[in-house]
Image (spheres, rainbow, N blue to C red):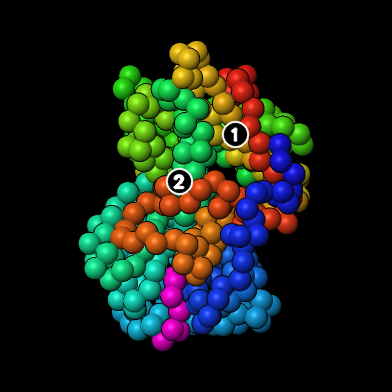
Amino acid sequence: MRGDNGDFPGRQARRGAVAGKAFGVVVLGGYGHFGRLIVERISGIGGCEAWVGGRDRDRATAMARQYGARVLHVDLCDPGLAERLRSTGASLVIHAAGPFQHLDLRVAEAALSAGMHYVDLADGRAHVLGIDALDARARALDRLVCSGASSVPALSGAVVDALRPRFARLQGVHVGITASAQAPGRATLASVLSWCGRPLPRSGPGVGVAHGLQGPVRHVFPAPLGTRWLLDCDVPDLALLPRRHPDLAAVRFSAGLGLDLYQLGGWLLSWPVRWGLLPDPVPLAGAMQAIAQRLAPLGDGCSGMFVSLSGSDHDGRPLSLCWELVAEREHGLYVPCAASIAIARALATGRLRARGAMPCVGLLGLDDVLDELAGLSVRAGLREDAGATTR
């Protein structure tokens, strides 16, 4: 596996300073779980100016002072949101204030009304797939509206795109993410609970229906992670990857947290939801977050991701590849932020000319995303025989 991201080719060309007028980036939810990390990294890009956006003026101000950013006191439900965004003079909105499972398009529409590009970190399937409703308007305004700039589908899709040429026929893709034991944000937990125990979409012909937080599987990551248990989850990849790679027969996504106790709890909770005994587990998000915060010290600070591909090579022989990412020292929290930062950099430097509204698949190369993790304890690598690592 490559080291701590210090040796990716072409890094200097991609990470140069932005020339000319400062490129303003408003990070909505800029003091939240992921927003604060995006503000930190955007503030380190020469020629970019970060704005910390949110309802809590005091928290936004404290975060802005820490990173030399500016403050936008704003409520996303405010009918004057577009005017508030326009008043910054910024060029891009990064929406990091989840949950995105039941999000409508009002923030993206406000960004367009303000004449700004829009990117979000959504992993809700309906929202990501529905963003193209704004395509005609975004094209008319010469703006990019992009949803899903996160670990899925942006990074997972970039991995599949990078490895697809090695296959004559790509038959299966299995994506998995294991986070550290650090307590997720309430918005993240609410997102997970929204499909806990619910049927997940079929991923291909002949594939049975899975249910959220069921279907346990274990993956053996490189050291220091080792074996992690994961459960079936709902993500945009289940629909986007078969659309992008029509020969795919099966797509699966699994996820989990660093302690096996979390997976056991999620699996147990999924059954009363599946049986109809618990109509809505989302209100439990606060209590589950409190429990997770108490258990967090038991974790090892490590997290990981894998993308396993199977099919046949150009000589007709079976081929299985497994791309893996390992993060230590809680630096895995930066991984879901990397794609949005890469898009900000590419827009600021003029390298990204795509316009319209679309899911964040095919916009970034794999190195574009990994480059934004430079200097962190994150490494990625590839090994063959994917089936030997996931059971």
Residue under pointer 2: 153
Element at label 2: helix
Residue 269 location in percent, x, y? 50, 37
Q: Residues under labels 1 and 2: Cα distance?
A: 15 Å
State which mark lies toward you, 1 or 2: 1
* Quadrant assignment, res 229: top right
Residue under pointer 1: 323
Element at label 1: strand
Q: Nearer the viewer, residue 78 or 330?
A: 330
Q: Name the chief secondary structure element in magenta.
A: loop
Residue 323 location in percent, x, y? 59, 34
Q: Residue at x 65, y 60 (%)?
A: 12
Q: Residue at x 49, y 43 (%)?
A: 158
Residue range in magenta is 87-94
Q: Residue at x 71, y 36 (%)?
A: 1
Q: Nearer the viewer, residue 307 or 29?
A: 307
Question: For the C terminus, which image quadrant?
Answer: top right
Question: Relative to residue 191, is residue 309 depicted above or below?
Answer: above
Let me know if residue 243 appears in the view.
yes
Residue 133 covered by magenta stretch: no
Q: Amino acid at mark 1?
A: Trp
